[in-house]
Structures are given as C-alpha cells and as structure tokens.
Amino acid sequence: MRCFPICPEFSVLHDPIDLFNLLLDLVLIAIGIWLAWNAAATQLRGKLGNAMRMIAAGALILGVAHLTETVLDQRFGLPSELNELTHRFFILVGFLSIGMGMSRITAAIVRSSKARQG
C-alpha cells in the first residue's frame, strides 16, 4: 500500500486500521474542542462555569491521550510499556478533571436545593 507523500516515515498511513484509529483520535479531540467551545459560549460564571470548563478540559485531555499514544507508537516507536504508561497518565489526568468537574456540579446542585428548601 502506498503511503501519503506528506509524511513517508509515519507508518500509520500504511495500514487502513491504523489510519482509522488515527481518525478516531482526531474525532475525540474535535469533540473535546467542541465541549470546550460550548463551555465558553454558555458564559457561565462561578462554580458551575468552572465545573463545565473542567469537564471540557478533561474530555480534551482524553482525546489528546489517545492521539499521543498513536503518535508515540507509530512515529517514534516508543517501547510499548512506556507508551502505555504515558497513555494511562494522560487518561488519569483527564478522568480526574472530569470527576472534579462533576463533583463541583453536584455540590452546586445540593447547595441550590438546600437554599430553596431552607
């Protein structure tokens, strides 16, 4: 199979499955950017706005984690153990960001609910 001329040494472009994985990684990043755009566009302020931005950042980090894994493996030939460790670190940071954002939203809802009752 012929490689694209833009980057002949990037082996992901030789295999259709690897190319599909790369495209999925780019879709994940696009979704993260879309979430970040929506979080900014809502112009929410305070704790709820911060929570939304944290969730969007976490989603973007998850997309970058997958792209980084693909690139480190295909382009730089990083040993698989080190590549997996790097990938898991990014995933951990992404999920922590999403979890912290969800926790802040939950706290804001509970506070709002108590204020209405009390």
Image: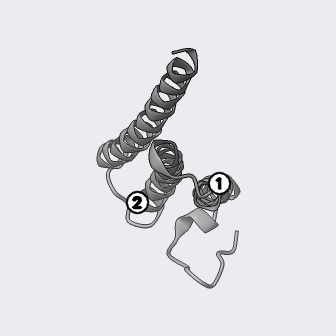
- In this image, 19 relative to 110: left or right? right
Disc 1 packing (10 Å; few <14; some 14–19; many ≥20): some
Q: Give the labeled residue for mark 1.
A: 31
Task: Kindly state the secondary structure of the residue where label 1 is placed.
Answer: helix
- In this image, 94 relative to 27: left or right? left
Residue 26 drawn at (x, y percent): 62, 60
Query: Which residue shows up at 44% across the image and 29% down it?
Result: 103
Q: Relative to the observer, which residue lies in front, 84 or 98?
A: 98
Query: Which residue shows up at 46% across the image and 48% down it?
Result: 46
Residue 13 lies, with reference to residue 103, above or below; the image says below
Q: Nearer the viewer, mark 1 or mark 2?
A: 1
Residue 1 drawn at (x, y percent): 70, 68
Question: Which amino acid lies under the numbered mark 2 shown in the image of this protein?
Answer: Leu
Query: Which residue shows up at 51% across the image and 23% down it?
Result: 115
**Sooner in the amino-acid sequence: mark 1 or mark 2:** 1
Q: Give the labeled residue for mark 2.
A: 72
The Cα–Cα distance between marks 1 and 2, rounded to whole angstroms, is: 22 Å
Task: Kindly state the secondary structure of the residue where label 2 is placed.
Answer: helix
